[in-house]
């Protein structure tokens, strides 16, 4: 009887040890899984989020400083339209990229050779600067900025219009056509033929600004 009792006691002890070992294994398993996936702290998450946010901001900054905005012609038009007089002076001193002028001609659907003539920039010079990433300064650059100013006025007219058609109205494309039409207020001259001088740009800007909302559609 004593021998049987000892065997039962030994078996019970082994069972308790096995059960204890199993519990320990189960307790450690979640911890092991948890350790396999390193935690990201709040600070680390902030750094990663900040890096992701800085990428598009940096891209936007390129457009502001180079005169060839990444979001297209419209972004540069917005910048010039909302610039202060002193900022305009700086923009005129910098000039515009030759490639931006080509972008502008495409957006307005004006042949690049015609656009160069409107701005008073020799075709060979403009093409060279566009290919090399150089700026067009001086009179040609000022004329390009003057044209961008006119685009800003056209966009404002469309934005202020109460006409239902204004919602889908392409002010940039419209201006490209309008400047090539003879205007009685300009003595039958085309606005495009006056944009190579500051005074000519001012005359066209005043004419464009006098157009009532909706009457240009």
Image: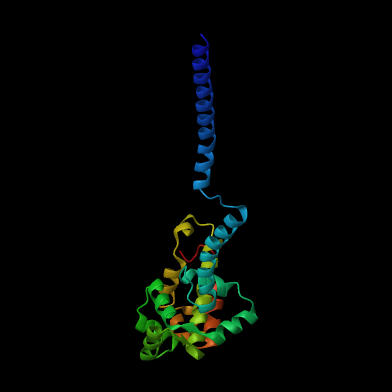
- Is 92 placed above or below 58 here? below
**Where on the picture, by quarter, is residue 120?**
bottom left
Residue found at x 48% / y 54%: 164
Drawn side of residue 42 relative to residue 124, left or right = right
Q: How many marks?
A: 0
Q: Nearer the viewer, residue 179 or 131?
A: 131
The answer to whether residue 125 is seen in the rendering is yes
- Is 96 placed above or below 208 here? below
Rendering colour mode: rainbow
Q: Quadrant of the C terminus?
A: bottom left
Residue found at x 41% / y 80%: 99
**Where on the picture, by quarter, is residue 93?**
bottom right
Residue found at x 52% / y 26%: 19
Q: Nearer the viewer, residue 216 or 36?
A: 36
Q: Nearer the viewer, residue 107 or 183?
A: 107
Image x and y of residue 140, in percent: 47, 88
Q: Furthest-front residue in view?
A: 2
- Is 105 placed above or below 17 here? below
The answer to whether residue 154 is seen in the rendering is no
Q: Furthest-top residue in view?
A: 1
Residue found at x 54% / y 28%: 20
Q: Nearer the viewer, residue 33 or 17?
A: 17
- Is 55 placed above or below 189 here? above
Image x and y of residue 216, in percent: 47, 66
Image x and y of residue 170, in percent: 44, 64
Image x and y of residue 13, in percent: 53, 22
């Amino acid at each position: 009887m004593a021998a049987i009792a000892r065997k039962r006691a030994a078996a019970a002890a082994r069972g308790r040890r096995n059960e204890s070992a199993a519990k320990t294994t189960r307790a450690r398993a979640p911890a092991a899984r948890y350790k396999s996936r390193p935690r990201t702290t709040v600070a680390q998450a902030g750094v990663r989020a900040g890096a992701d946010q800085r990428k598009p901001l940096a891209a936007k900054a390129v457009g502001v400083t180079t005169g060839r905005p990444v979001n297209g012609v419209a972004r540069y038009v917005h910048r010039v339209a909302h610039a202060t007089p002193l900022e305009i002076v700086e923009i005129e001193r910098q000039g515009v990229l030759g490639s931006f002028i080509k972008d502008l001609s495409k957006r307005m659907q004006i042949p690049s050779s015609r656009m160069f003539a409107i701005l008073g920039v020799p075709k060979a010079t403009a093409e060279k600067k566009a290919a090399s990433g150089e700026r067009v300064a001086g009179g040609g650059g000022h004329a390009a900025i003057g044209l961008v100013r006119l685009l800003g006025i056209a966009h404002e007219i469309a934005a202020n219009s109460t006409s239902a058609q204004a919602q889908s109205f392409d002010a940039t494309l419209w201006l490209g056509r309008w400047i090539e039409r003879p205007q009685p207020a300009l003595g039958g001259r085309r606005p495009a033929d006056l944009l190579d001088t500051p005074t000519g740009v001012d005359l066209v800007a005043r004419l464009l600004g006098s157009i009532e909302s909706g009457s240009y559609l």
